[in-house]
Image: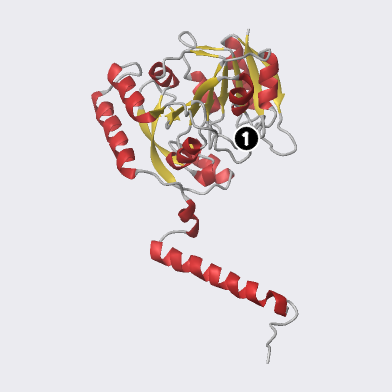
Amino acid sequence: MKYSLGPRFPLMGQQRYFMLLIFVGSLFVIKFILKGPIWSISEPALDMNMYSQKMNGLKKLLQDGVTEDDPSLIQLIRTYFVFSPEISPYNLNNPYLLDYSCDQSGAVDKILNQKERGFYIEAGAYDGESISNTLFFEKARQWNGLLIEPDPFVFERLKAKNRKAILVNSCLNIKPQPSILQFNRGNEMGRVWVDREDKIWVKEKKMEVNVIEVPCFSLYSILIAVNQTNIDYFSLDVEGRELSVLQSIPFDKIFIDSFTVEYSNGEGKYTLEMKSFMEKNGYQYVTNLPGNKTCTARDALFKKI
């Protein structure tokens, strides 16, 4: 005799239903064994011994009070935090796309007159593919550049994409000297976690609180370490800390021809302050880039006069 589970589970679906129950039950067994959330299973592998070694080396330099251009600091960054461009083929989820951005790449390409073989920086590079503002320039214009991502777990995914760029695993410090700062991973929309403003932002965005320690270097220190101070395009997306990073750049030592700066995490007065600051440093505000139907990233575009 056959038994039916009722009209919502016809006989044809019984096997799938029981398989689903077994699968869900298995997840909770794994959760119990690992004593952690189910979703932690998918975290990229991170060599904690190497990460601890890097952080301990930085802590020693912090005790010595090094400056942003100290040779020992530059050597530490080169040795532990900088990864060379990959020569292997791309490992992308969508290898046949050309523009992975929310239309930012096309706008920058236009104001730079389709320049070939330039150099970019993308701060807040994430995994190197999703909504990347710079991958277009690698694939279509033969650029190379610098990808900066502070989250060490997301950084492992970035490395796996085989980007033709220098990779740096750190956050951008708004102070000249290096630091080790708390960083909230927050559903992978990471942001430094150092003051009341950061905590308010996380609360307003209803972000998960998942705080870790990350190394932070000034942009100037990183550029000395990679021997590059002439930049054609800087994509800046650090979840609400953009103006502070801009204010930390020594424009007398670094040439940057164009910027896209995210403003969706700080509008109104914040955006006006950003435009005013950039104009004082010799940049023309070109336009806002509001994103498109598939993504809502909003950036302000600036060009050196």
Q: Report whether 109 appears left or right of 72.
A: right
Say which quadrant the C terminus sits in.
top right
Q: Report whether 265 appears left or right of 145.
A: right
* Foreground residue among 24 and 292: 24
Disc tally is: 1
Residue behind mark 1? 131
In the image, what residue occupies the spot 56% across and 10% down? 281
State whether residue 198 appears in this view.
Answer: yes
In the image, what residue occupies the spot 44% across and 24% down? 174
Residue 83 drawn at (x, y percent): 41, 29
* Foreground residue among 139 and 243: 139
Residue 98 drawn at (x, y percent): 67, 30
Q: Report whether 274 appears left or right of 208.
A: right
Secondary structure of the residue carrying tag 1 is loop
In the image, what residue occupies the spot 68% across and 92% down? 1
* Residue occupying the far front of the picture: 88
Q: Amino acid at mark 1?
A: Ile
- Dot 1 crowding, Cα within 10 Å, few <14, some 14–19, many 20+: some
Residue 300 drawn at (x, y percent): 65, 23
Residue 304 drawn at (x, y percent): 61, 10
Above or below, comparing residue 270 to residue 22 in the picture = above
In the image, what residue occupies the spot 46% across and 59% down? 37
